[in-house]
């Protein structure tokens, strides 16, 4: 069967080699489309039975162009790039590979935060993270890794996650917070780890960010869609002590930079999961899940039931 890896942002070569090994040793065939255009994708899926993607958009047109497709695996966590309902309608199983790139994203949180805290290494005095408070909005795989690293820095960590029992947090030395307003009011740094869903879109903006203490930094390695950009711009203009760090560039990037380029930091391209380790973890997991699905029908990581 043809398993197509179609990634606009390619995996590290070592991960592609690993995927190829799994695919070929299982008697399947690997096709690779890296940095392809939309037209390339539409033609490459025509005879694919399985698809491995990252943030690549898998919408109706792609699914309609892939009559033989049985499974799509998003090598990563967020599945907001895939039309899950339409895939289900077409009997295409969609899976993700939860947790496989979580450490890479968590490490980037601190890479960016330290850079901001040290004034981007411009030679002036910055500040330390030790003893400061970090609030996590959601305690999934990434949030949990951020908490682990934050404790190494000597930070005090709390988290808001209405889907988790307090005992999960307390067992890991994280203080549970039940009110989102409290999370923003009590933490100098708030790191976002919620998915982009109809409920979360545009949910983070002025109302919450205005509650942050002096010198507050909002960190977004999740999705740009969860931000209400107009109202975040508004509060950043009013509160000149607040900062915004994002691995997911806002649509209105120029407006944020025009406001104060020193108080915002954006990666040129989403970099959170861009490590060899994360590519290997997520890419190989995706290949294994496909082979397992073909051989045993295992749907453990299915997200469109
Ligand atoms: C994810 O949802 O897994 C991360 O945001 C990484 O996305 P990427 O594979 O597009 O880098």
Image: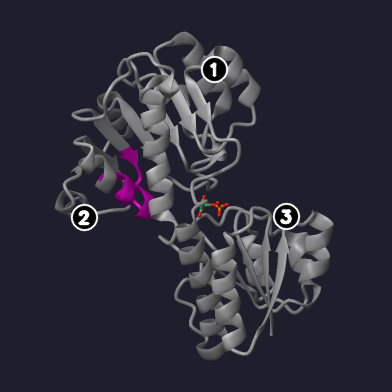
Give the numbered dot on residue 261. Answer: 1
Residue 216 position, x and y percent, is: 35, 21
Residue 83 position, x and y percent, is: 65, 59
- Disc 2 designates what residue? 168
Which color scheme did the rendering employ for the protein?
Answer: one colour
- Residue 68 part of the magenta-drawn span: no
Q: Residues within 10 Å of mark 2 (few under 14, many from 20)?
A: few
Q: Secondary structure at mark 2?
A: helix
Most foreground residue, 190 or 6: 6
Residue 204 position, x and y percent, is: 46, 31
Q: Residue at x 52, y 46 (%)?
A: 196
Q: Residues within 10 Å of mark 1 (few under 14, many from 20)?
A: few
Residue 206 position, x and y percent, is: 46, 22
- Disc 3 designates what residue? 35
Q: Residue at x 16, y 49 (%)?
A: 170
Q: Can you tell me whether the CB of the residue at mark 1 lies under 8 Å from the nearest atom of ligand 1?
A: no
Magenta region: which residues?
Answer: 136-147
Q: Residue at x 20, y 50 (%)?
A: 166
**First in sequence: mark 3 or mark 2?**
3
Quarter assignment of residue 224: top right
Most foreground residue, 107 or 99: 107
Horizontal side of residue 3 vs 248, given as left or right: right
């Amino acid at each position: 069967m043809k398993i197509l890896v179609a990634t606009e942002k390619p995996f590290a070569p070592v991960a592609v080699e690993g995927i190829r090994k799994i695919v070929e040793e299982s008697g399947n065939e690997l096709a690779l489309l890296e940095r392809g255009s939309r037209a390339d994708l539409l033609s490459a899926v025509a005879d694919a039975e399985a698809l491995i993607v990252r943030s690549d958009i898998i919408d109706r047109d792609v699914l309609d162009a892939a009559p033989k497709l049985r499974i799509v695996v998003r090598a990563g966590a967020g599945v907001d790039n895939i039309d899950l309902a339409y895939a289900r309608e077409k009997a295409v199983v969609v899976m993700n590979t939860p947790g496989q790139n979580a450490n890479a994203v968590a490490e980037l949180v601190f890479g960016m935060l330290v850079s901001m805290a040290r004034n981007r290494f411009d030679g002036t005095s910055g500040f330390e993270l030790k003893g400061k408070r970090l609030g996590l909005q959601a305690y999934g795989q990434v949030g949990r890794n951020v908490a682990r690293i934050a404790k190494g820095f000597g930070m005090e960590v709390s988290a808001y996650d209405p889907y988790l029992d307090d005992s999960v947090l307390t067992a890991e030395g994280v203080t549970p917070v039940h009110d989102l307003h409290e999370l923003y009011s009590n933490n100098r740094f708030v790191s976002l780890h919620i998915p982009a869903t109809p409920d979360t879109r545009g949910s983070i903006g002025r109302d919450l960010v205005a509650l942050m203490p002096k010198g507050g930094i909002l960190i977004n390695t999740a999705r740009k869609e969860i931000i209400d950009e107009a109202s975040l711009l508004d509060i950043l203009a009013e509160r000149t002590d607040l900062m915004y760090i994002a691995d997911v560039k806002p649509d209105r990037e120029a407006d944020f930079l025009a406001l104060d380029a020193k108080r915002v930091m954006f990666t040129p391209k989403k970099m959170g999961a861009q490590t060899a380790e994360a590519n290997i973890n997520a890419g190989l997991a995706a290949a294994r899940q496909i082979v397992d699905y073909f051989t045993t029908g295992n749907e453990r990581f299915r997200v469109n039931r």
